[in-house]
Image (tube, grey):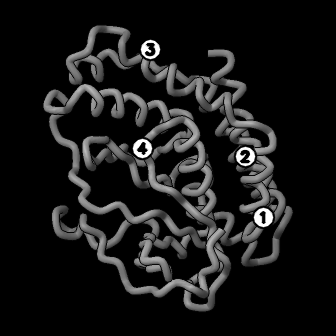
Amino acid sequence: MIDSSKLKYKAFKDPRSETVEGFTEGFSGKLLLATAPDGKKYIVKHEEMTDAGNEFVACFIGKRMGVPVPEAHILLPDRRLNSPFAVAIEYLDCLELVGAYEKLSEQEKKDVCSQYALSILVDNTDVVQLFRRKGRIVQVDFADALAMSSMMLTVAYGTGNIGMAKQYIKNYSNYFAETLGYMDFEFPDLARSLGMEAGAEEKLMLETARRVLDITEDDIKGVGKELAIIYPDEMVEHYTNAIRVIQEKVADA
């Protein structure tokens, strides 16, 4: 958790606006660049209700799996932000969008496999955008992960219909578990594009995925405690149970 009152904010211009024709902003809305007293910088998402939870939990899982992802922190509510549901994501500079996989180093090729494994486990439905940074391959956007969508929850909570919100969350949780039931790490086309032998990508992904089993129940409770700063109990339960579901599916893989 970060005390948002100690941060200085300014508007952040998404670099994609420079490289993608017609792009203005992503589905997370207007982003902020925050600077902490120690000089650390963060990208702040603060407009969509589920962005904070999706980013925070996916980055937590990625870090525990040893996958190159930024740190993500729940933000205390701040009147300067557009909602109480905000996340500060470590700002990573010098990002280079990955093009041809065959031009990557051996470490970078392993990173590509680990990024695919993470995206599968957290059901990151956004197109996987991978970037090269200082000899590693990183992924920086998990706003669409974990089967949680802001639109209907914002309406339900905004109108005080908690029963409706809980039903939506139950549906999202069921969908997430069902999606993981089809988990598969076999990507022969990816292996070919990386110049790997058939099956090498599956082995690397499974090795990476199995690290999620090292997350303890105390770790999960710690995640829940952070999420409870901004979210109601039913949303916290969805996110913490999602980690347990991931562990169950990986254990059976």
Q: Position of residue 95 (x, y in %)?
A: 25, 56
Helix, strand or loop at mark 4: loop
Q: Amino acid at mark 3?
A: Lys
Residue 187: % across, % down: 37, 19
Which residue does the numbered mark 1 point to in the structure image? 228
The residue under the point 56% across, 34% down is: 121
Alpha carbon separation for disc pair 4 and 1:
26 Å
Inter-mark Cα distance, 4 to 3: 18 Å
Residue 30 seen by the camera: no
10 Å crowding of disc 1: few (<14), some (14-19), many (20+): some
Which residue is the site of mark 2?
171
Q: CB under 8 Å between callouts 4 and 1?
A: no
**Nearer the camera: disc 4 or disc 1:** 4
- Label annotation for residue 114: none
3D distance between C-alphas at marks 3 and 1? 36 Å
Number of other residues with Cα within 10 Å of mark 2, as a class: few under 14, some 14 to 19, many 20 or more: few
- Callout 1 secondary element: loop
Observer-side mark, 1 or 2, equals 1
Q: Crowding near pointer 4: few (<14 within 10 Å), some, many (20+)?
A: some
Q: Which residue is mark 3?
A: 203
Q: Which amino acid lies under the numbered mark 1 shown in the image of this protein?
A: Ala
The answer to whether 15 is drawn above or below residue 203 in the figure is below
Locate the N terminus by quadrant. Answer: bottom right
User: Residue type at mark 2?
Assistant: Asn
Q: CA distance from mark 3 to mark 2?
A: 32 Å
The relative height of residue 181 versus residue 160 in the rendered view (above or below) is above
